[in-house]
Amino acid sequence: MTGVARPLTGELGLIVAQGLPVMAGVAEGLGDAGADVRVLDDPRLSGAQDQVREALTQALDGRVPALVLVSLLADAAGGRRPLTEQTLDDWRAQAIEPIRTAMRVLVALGEVMKPAGRGSIVLLAPSLSLVGGDGRVALGTALEGQRGLVKSVARQWGGTGVTVNWIAAAPVALSDRFDAASLAAKGDAVPVALGRRPDARAEIASLAAWMAGPGGRGMTGATLMLDGGEWMVP
C-alpha cells in the first residue's frame, strides 16, 4: 500500500485466537502494516502447558514475533444468560478456563520472547467488562481476570523488553454477536463521539501495530479504549 506506514515490515505478527471470534479484519490490517501474519487457532490451546507450548512452537517455526495479538474467550460467552441460570459447568467453561488459557499462553510466549528481549503482546477483547453488560457476568469475569493478568505479567516482565497491553474495543466492532448488546445505562446518555464504530482492519490492527513499534515501547500494562469515544473511561 503506497504511502501507508508499514511498521511491521518483515516482522512476524502472530494472532492467537480461540472461542468467540473477534479477529475479523484484524489479520488483514496487520498485513497492511507489513507483517508476515500467522494465525494460531488450535485445540491444544485449551490443554496443559506442554500442549500450549507445542502448538506455539509449531506456529512460530523458530521465529520471534514482533507482535502477538491474543483473543481467548469461550465461544458461548457472546450470548446472554442471567446469573441465576448460570450453571457451575457454564461458569468454569466461560469464566475460569479463558483465564487459565491466557495464563498458559503468556507463559509459553514469555519463554520465546523474553530471551530475545523484544516483542509486544496485546490482548484484544470487547469493552463490556469495563462498563458492565447485562446477562454476561461470565464473560465480564473472564475479561477482567485476563486484564488483571496482563497488568501483573507486564510488571514482572518490565525489564525484559517485552510489553504486554490490553485493547478494549467496542463490542460491535469485534463481532456481530454484540450488535444487540445490552450495556449499562448512562444517566447522561451521549452518542459515540466519532459517530461510528472503530474499523477492525484500519484502526484496531493499526493501533496494535503501532504498539509493537518504537512509539509503543514505553507502554506496558495499559488498557487502551478503542470504542469511538462512547464511554471515555480511564
Image (cartoon, grey):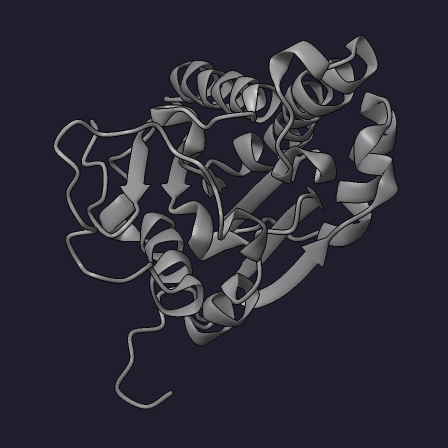
Q: Nearer the viewer, residue 169 or 157?
A: 169
Quadrant that contains the N terminus: bottom left
The answer to whether residue 152 is above or below residue 41 is: above
The quarter of the displayed image where residue 129 is located: top left
Picture coordinates of residue 117, whole percent (x, y): 47, 35
The quarter of the displayed image where residue 198 is located: bottom left
Q: Nearer the viewer, residue 199 or 152?
A: 199
The answer to whether residue 120 is above or below residue 196 is: above
Quadrant that contains the C terminus: top left
Q: Nearer the viewer, residue 61 or 90?
A: 90
Picture coordinates of residue 8, whole percent (x, y): 42, 64
Residue at 57%, 42% in the rendered image: 70
Picture coordinates of residue 38, whole percent (x, y): 67, 61
Picture coordinates of residue 114, whole percent (x, y): 54, 30
The quarter of the displayed image where residue 105 is located: top right
Q: Is residue 227 left or right of residue 63?
A: left
Residue at 57%, 60% in the rendered image: 12
Q: Is residue 183 left or right of residue 187?
A: right
Residue at 31%, 55% in the rendered image: 210
